[in-house]
Amino acid sequence: MNNAAIRSDWVGRVIDGRFTLLQFLGGSKGSGVFLTEMPGDRTEKAAIKIIPASSIDPEAYLAGWAATTTLSHPHLMRLFHAGRCQIDDDVQLYVVTEYAEENLSQILPERPLTPTEAREMLDPVLDALSYLHERGFVHGALKPSNIMVVENQLKLSVDSIEVAGKLGKHLSTLSVYDAPERATEVLLPATDIWSLGITLVEALTQYPPVGEKSTNDERVVPESVPQPFSAIAHECLRFAPLRRCTLSDIKVHLEPAHSLVSPASKPVQKAPAKFLVTALVAALVVFAVIAALQLRTRQNRVSLPTAEQQPVPSIAALPTQPPDQGIPTSKSMIKGAVAERVLPEVLASAYKSIRGKVDVRVRVIVDPRGNVSSATFDSSGPSKYFAKVALQAGQQWRFKPAQADGQAVSSVWILQFEFTHTATEVSAAEVSP
């Protein structure tokens, strides 16, 4: 299939009497992807992928797409429709899915992901793969171009999903992302594990790892890949499928990173949830103040893996008023002060989605050294996305600690984030001691 011909000759055509090809988005030698719209009163963008029926096993593809329509997961693209059509004298297969604003392969030529961004990428990818594997499917084509951003949420493509335990769709050549056994053996979850290892290395270095023929074609993980990602990649890229790690093994490798993240931050990535009822908040705050006296390790920064554009701005400490000497509240107590604040890292597309304003209040526990030792929501507001970036920013603030009888002590602050269409405003108030 000639992509240039597709772009010049096929834009404007209507597929199957309902999907108009509005714009050529790209493709490969064997397929093309176009922008289209879902039929109906409510205009909704979608992507339509067209594949010549003569170049594939059409029944295998149609059966795979039919099975995929039964799947539903927040980190999997939605598949709307699939079928056959005829363009000129040729029979084509087509599949219609959600439209993605961007994918990881568009970001990597500009820069690699940071370790924290890679960590954020892995969470939804592991969730989606776990969902597929538990239901007897494999993704079959995990790679940066199939890790999508849909309305500020990371999702995996679905047009390649296949049933596990069967020979995969015929591939004329294997790509660097395809496991060595992909062409001759049945598909297993380990096939996705290999692809995940390749993708992880490329995400952190901008280049997929190379093969080493002298060691049975094992892939060499660059020394620049930091832990725990280097260990994960090594275990993903073992030549023998049965020797590769599992998704559970990967989660164990990442567990230390989990321990550095505030417990309240985990639900932000998952489905919306009410974190705590009012009485439980009060009880946990009292407990956290006591526990904070023993904490000395500051939580790590967590940022988004992907963006419709480069994040604006990157996390950067923005000074407020110069730290003062504190405001005496009694002869023995001196209040703390903000020493360094961090604005949330917000995607440009997320700002555009705001109508009015979004308010988020984050309650932080400040240890005697002025570091944030715990961050929870006082009010998460209506948006899971803005709640998440506010919490992440709040974890990075620094304070001049409060003092009692001349000794630095822990304190509790409320950080109020107000997001509007054009900017982010933030204020801070110490609520104890």
Image (cartoon, rainbow, N blue to C red):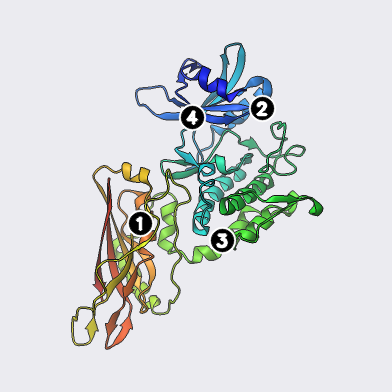
Mark 4 or mark 1: which comes first in sequence?
Answer: 4
Q: Is residue 274 visible?
A: no
Q: Give neighbour class at mark 3: few <14, some 14-19, many 20+ (Cα, 10 Å).
A: some
Mark 3 or mark 2: which comes first in sequence?
Answer: 2
Residue position marked by numbered label 1 in the rendering: 344
Is disc 1 placed on a helix, strand or loop? loop
Residue 338, percent across and down? 28, 70
Kind of residue sitting beneath label 4: Ala
Residue position marked by numbered label 2 in the rendering: 60
Residue position marked by numbered label 4 in the rendering: 47
Q: On the image, which quarter does residue 373 sit in?
A: bottom left
Q: Are discs 4 and 3 less than 8 Å apart at CB?
A: no
Query: Can you say whether 169 is above or below 431 in the image?
Result: above
Left or right: where does residue 341 sit relative to residue 164? left
Q: Nearer the viewer's eye, disc 3 or disc 1?
A: 1
- Foreground: 293 or 313? 313
Residue 218, percent across and down? 75, 52
Q: Give neighbour class at mark 1: few <14, some 14-19, many 20+ (Cα, 10 Å).
A: many
Q: Are discs 4 and 1 less than 8 Å apart at CB?
A: no
Is disc 2 placed on a helix, strand or loop? helix
Residue 134, percent across and down? 60, 45
